[in-house]
Image: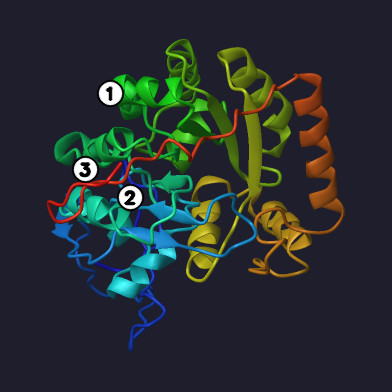
């Protein structure tokens, strides 16, 4: 298959060779016979034999120092996903491969118990599904996230969850139990209220009205819900900031944050190809504004800038967001408790207390 092809129901329109590949392909039309392109590519599940499940970070840009990702790759197919370039580490394309070649960690629950039981482990909120959505469609079949959640709730461990999937409602029983002990916060990702734009950018994720319903249902179950407006893409969805915040507040969200579009590595060319196909009249304007937010480049990975951008347009977005959030009186999320943690029993030995 050439590296440029649009598949219905998939997000990527360009599948570049990953940056570590010794060869790089570029699709051209020279008038000769071209291989027939498939209309569909099935999702393929592959085992990730991980030795550890908790990943630690020291980033000042995120409010947690550890996370768990049950899956690599994501079938939601969001064209803007900052995690797409991580598939290069698997010698795969961040394009269609990221959406169709999914890796899962079958030993995740056992590994988690082992790591929580370590004598030097100190509890602090774990972010579940921060790289790729822990509730993506394949979770319905494999149930790994549910098993991980059962371990965390059993041992009274605090956690954050970020998702855009209605599948999280399956686990309301566990989440409500954790919420009663102030152990969980769910953050629902919202990108737009425009169903057509969402369908093209996030082809297999929950539609915008459904995400508002997720917020409402979790809130009614006593689970604190924040919202991540992400990514904010200048010219494309930034005009919706105030209306999105009003909609999620009405649905019950207690807090809200945002992230500016990030285009690391191969994602730069991929997003520009998507714009050329789906938003050709706005493409140049969008990319110019992105460069304005990134000091003349399409991306700046510097701490403090990669999430929010810099310059006059970044300041304008920040001011609009803060004013809208203040006007809507978001009460804020309750702090999570780490003092209730009960370590698993290690190697069959009973604890003293």
Other residues around mark 1 within 10 Å, as few (<14) / some (14–19) / many (≥20): few
Quadrant for the C terminus, please: top left
Q: Which residue is mark 1?
A: 170
Residue 97 rendering spot, x and y as whole percentages: 28, 61
| Residue 74: mark in rendering | 2
- SS label for mark 1: helix
Task: Point out the frontmost of discs 1 and 2.
Answer: 1
The residue at the far right in this view is 312
Compared to residue 109, the image places residue 57 above or below, namely: below
Q: Which residue is mark 3?
A: 144
Q: Would residue 16 be visible to someone looking at this image?
A: yes
Residue 264 rendering spot, x and y as whole percentages: 54, 67
Give the colouring mode of the picture: rainbow
Compared to residue 315, the image places residue 209 above or below, namely: above
**Which residue is pictured at 28% across the width and 53% down the height?**
117
Quadrant for the N terminus, please: bottom left
In front here: 199 or 301? 301
Other residues around mark 2 within 10 Å, as few (<14) / some (14–19) / many (≥20): many
Which mark is first along the chain, 2 or 1? 2
Report, in whole angstroms, how far the alpha carbon at label 1 lies from the one at label 2.
19 Å
Residue 24 rendering spot, x and y as whole percentages: 37, 82
In front here: 135 or 82? 135
- SS label for mark 2: loop
Which mark is first along the chain, 3 or 2? 2
């Amino acid at each position: 298959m050439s590296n440029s092809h649009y598949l219905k129901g998939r997000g990527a329109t360009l599948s570049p060779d990953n940056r570590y590949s010794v060869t790089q392909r570029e699709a051209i039309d020279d008038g000769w016979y071209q291989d027939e392109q498939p209309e569909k590519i099935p999702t393929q599940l592959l085992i990730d034999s991980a030795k550890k499940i908790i990943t630690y970070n020291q980033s000042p840009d995120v409010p947690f120092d550890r996370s768990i990702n049950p899956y690599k790759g994501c079938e939601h197919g969001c064209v803007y996903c900052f995690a797409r370039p991580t598939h290069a580490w698997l010698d795969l394309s961040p394009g269609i491969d990221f959406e169709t070649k999914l890796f899962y960690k079958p030993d995740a629950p056992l590994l988690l118990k082992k790591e929580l039981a370590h004598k030097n482990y100190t509890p602090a909120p774990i972010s579940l599904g921060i790289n790729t959505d822990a509730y993506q469609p394949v979770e319905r079949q494999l149930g790994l996230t549910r098993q991980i959640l059962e371990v965390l709730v059993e041992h009274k461990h605090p956690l954050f969850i970020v998702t855009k999937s209605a599948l999280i409602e399956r686990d309301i029983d566990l989440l409500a139990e954790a919420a009663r002990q102030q152990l969980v916060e769910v953050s629902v990702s919202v990108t737009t209220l425009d169903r057509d734009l969402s369908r093209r950018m996030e082809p297999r994720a929950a539609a915008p009205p459904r995400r508002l319903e997720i917020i409402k249902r979790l809130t009614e179950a006593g689970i604190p819900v924040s919202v991540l407006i992400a990514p904010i893409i200048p010219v494309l969805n930034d005009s919706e900031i105030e209306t999105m915040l009003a909609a999620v507040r009405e649905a019950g969200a207690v807090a809200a944050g945002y992230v500016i579009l990030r285009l690391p590595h191969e994602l730069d060319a991929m997003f520009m190809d998507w714009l050329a196909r789906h938003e050709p009249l706005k493409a140049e304007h969008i990319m110019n504004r992105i460069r304005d937010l990134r000091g003349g480049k399409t991306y700046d990975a510097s701490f403090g800038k990669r999430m929010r951008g810099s310059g006059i347009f970044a300041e304008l977005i920040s001011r609009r967001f803060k004013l809208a959030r203040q006007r809507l009186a978001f009460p804020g999320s309750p702090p999570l408790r780490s003092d209730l943690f009960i370590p698993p029993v290690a190697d069959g030995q009973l604890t003293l207390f």
